[in-house]
Amino acid sequence: MTRVQANLLLLLAAAIWGGGFVAQSTAMKAIGPFWFIGLRFAVATFAVLPFVLFEARKAKAKTSKRHAGLYVLTGLALFGGAATQQVGLQTTTVTNSSFITGLYVVFVPLIAVLFLRRAPHWIIWPGALTAVAGIYLLSGGHLSALTSGDLLTVVCAIFWSIQITLAGTTVSETKRPLALSATQFAVTAVCALAIAAAAEPISLSSVWTAAPEILYVGIFSSGLAFVLQVIGQRYTTPSQAAIFLSSEALFGASLAALLLGESMSAMGYTGCALMFIAMLVVELVPSFARRGLGAV
């Protein structure tokens, strides 16, 4: 596979994830957030299983108790991110959610300091300030304009950061990203379905109404896009992968405007631009420093 083909796979993954924001929002017209999360990740678990079985045939080592524990912890972090994002979508727009969620690119190095005791690259600090400025402008220049959904989505980005950090550590040890994926999907599904059964009403008609969104997000956003990401990142550089995957936010905002009629002020678009710049800078600058311009 050529680098161009790999980058196109990553771009397709980002587009699928961008469409997932729209599906997550529209599904809640018929079904509660935790039922949606539970059913979505149950579908995702079964969608990934065939790939897990194929991966298991080539595995050189069995999964240890430590690895199983890391799988579960990663799943709990994924559940935290999925839950705060989905509940947040009840009181924020798809556009805001897609961009604010992208703050995980800034938070990941900071979370790594806590978990791995690694000092972040110096660019993280101006990157974080740029991202905060972006959120401020996204609110219209008034913090009071930020909704509870926006704040929940910031928490969501922190959960995603923890999940990414744990997943990176786990996969480096196990060499089995698909096994981790299926396990974390299953953990998230069980947690969400338990809460949904206790707190949210449900009916077969509501599930049927939300079925297209559940299937799209479960099969494509969680299953297919994850596989595309794993394949694509094997044949391209981290800096180029960051550019293409970060376009998830742009796809989310574009599809929200096209399908849901959402719009923002000029200040809001400026805020989105600042957040997108922060996402790219914290990924690209360290790569330039390590490899030089010729390797990017």
Image: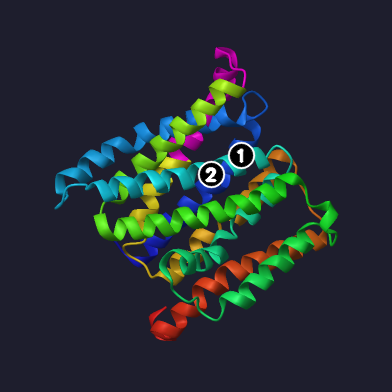
Quadrant (top left, top right, bottom left, bottom right) of the C terminus: bottom left
The one nearer the camera, 8 or 296, is 296
Image quadrant assignment for residue 179: top left
What residue is drawn where x is 75% and y is 65%? 270
In the rendered image, residue 117, in percent from the top left (x then y), is placed at: 43, 71
The one nearer the camera, 24 or 200, is 200
Mark 1: secondary structure = helix
Taking the image as drawn, is residue 237 in sight? yes
Residue position marked by numbered label 2 in the rendering: 80
Taking the image as drawn, is residue 257 in sight? no
Q: Residue furthest top?
A: 204
In the rendered image, residue 104, in percent from the top left (x then y), is placed at: 55, 59
In the rendered image, residue 175, in percent from the top left (x then y), is placed at: 25, 56
In the rendered image, residue 127, in percent from the top left (x then y), is placed at: 62, 73
Q: Which residues are magenta?
A: 200-220
Which mark lies nearer to you, 1 or 2? 2
What residue is drawn where x is 48% and y is 66%? 114
Inspect the image, locate mark 2, and give the three-letter code of the amino acid beneath it.
Gly
Quadrant (top left, top right, bottom left, bottom right) of the N terminus: bottom left
Image quadrant assignment for residue 131: bottom right
Residue 211 in magenta stretch: yes
Inspect the image, locate mark 1, and give the three-letter code of the amino acid beneath it.
Gln
Residue position marked by numbered label 1 in the rendering: 86
How far apart marks 1 and 2 lie (CA) works out to 10 Å
Mark 2 packing: few (<14 Cα in 10 Å), some, or many (20+)? many
* Sequence-first disc among 1 and 2: 2
